[in-house]
Image: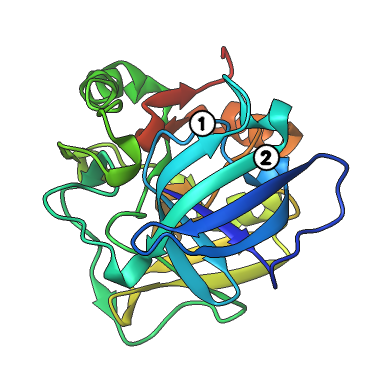
Amino acid sequence: MNIIGVADGVSNLFPKKVTVMLVHAVNGETIGAHKMDSAALPENFNKPTVLEMNGTSWRIVKAFVAKENSYLRGKKLVLHVQERNEFIQGDKYMVPTRVSSLPAVVNDCLFNDFTISVSADDWGQLQFFSNDHAPAIQEDINSIASILSPPDALLGYDELHIREHNEKYQLDIPFDECCAFLNPAEKGNLSLNGGFIENGFALRTDSFTYYGVVENNIIKQLALQTFDCADDEFMSILSSYGLVLVDWCNADIFSIDG
């Protein structure tokens, strides 16, 4: 699921801008036009997408581009949207895959610098695994890839693939060592269903926000909140701990070998 944010209807001042016209999908009324950074927009509207604007969440139901192939060339985009809480999901799914079970929640948390709110749809969608498990994970990747292109992708997926890897392929990374390696500016917690994920943690560096589960000072699960590109920090953590990053919703695996 994509979530696009627009602060006060105006984006930051970057050179590549796209004029985004919002039209209400039900009554046809024009909501407004906004200049947005092209980097904040998806290259293709081929998955359920939510637009956060001025405190309102809009579900994008149709996208019309000014030029063929890419709206980035035409620099104009028309989005038909509906209030997220009024959009009828029906029997469609917002994501193509979810974990089989979520971690337990408790009343107390390990750290307090900041809080990440996660949902059943969000949990572990950008997850690190040992490189040794990549061949087995590829079987799930193939299953997810087969359901990624429904006819009306913005409206949701027709199927949901359930993953069983959280317990089977846990990590074994010393927490203190990893913190020394990443040198996070902040250590936070994870909020789920009104509680805190048991033994949950979040680490915020200059490049990424990591989160996961730690038991007896050993990281068992590790994921990223978002992932835009591979930088030196990302490549270093892959190589230092022998990891791959699995982007479940896009059926992709990032590794040192590419």
Q: Residue at x 69, y 67 (%)?
A: 9
Looking at the image, residue 15 sits to the left or right of residue 63; the answer is right
In the rendered image, the residue lying farthest to the bottom is 107
The image shows a total of numbered marks equal to: 2
Residue indicated by mark 1: 44
First in sequence, mark 1 or 2: give its number.
1
Looking at the image, residue 179 sits to the left or right of residue 192; the answer is right
Q: Residue at x 41, y 30 (%)?
A: 130
Of badges 1 and 2, nearer the viewer stands: 2
Q: Residue 71 appears at what percent x and percent y?
A: 63, 31
Q: Residue 48 appears at what percent x and percent y?
A: 36, 46
Quarter of the picture holding the C terminus: top right
Q: Residue 117 appears at what percent x and percent y?
A: 43, 70
- Secondary structure under tag 1 reads loop
User: Could you say which disc has been placed on residue 133 in the image?
Assistant: none
Residue 46 higher or lower than 222, as above or below: above
Residue indicated by mark 2: 76
Looking at the image, residue 258 sits to the left or right of residue 106; the answer is right
Looking at numbered disc 1 in the image, what kind of residue is underneath it?
Asn
Q: Is residue 177 visible?
A: no
Q: Is residue 111 visible?
A: yes
Q: Residue 170 appears at what percent x and percent y?
A: 32, 42
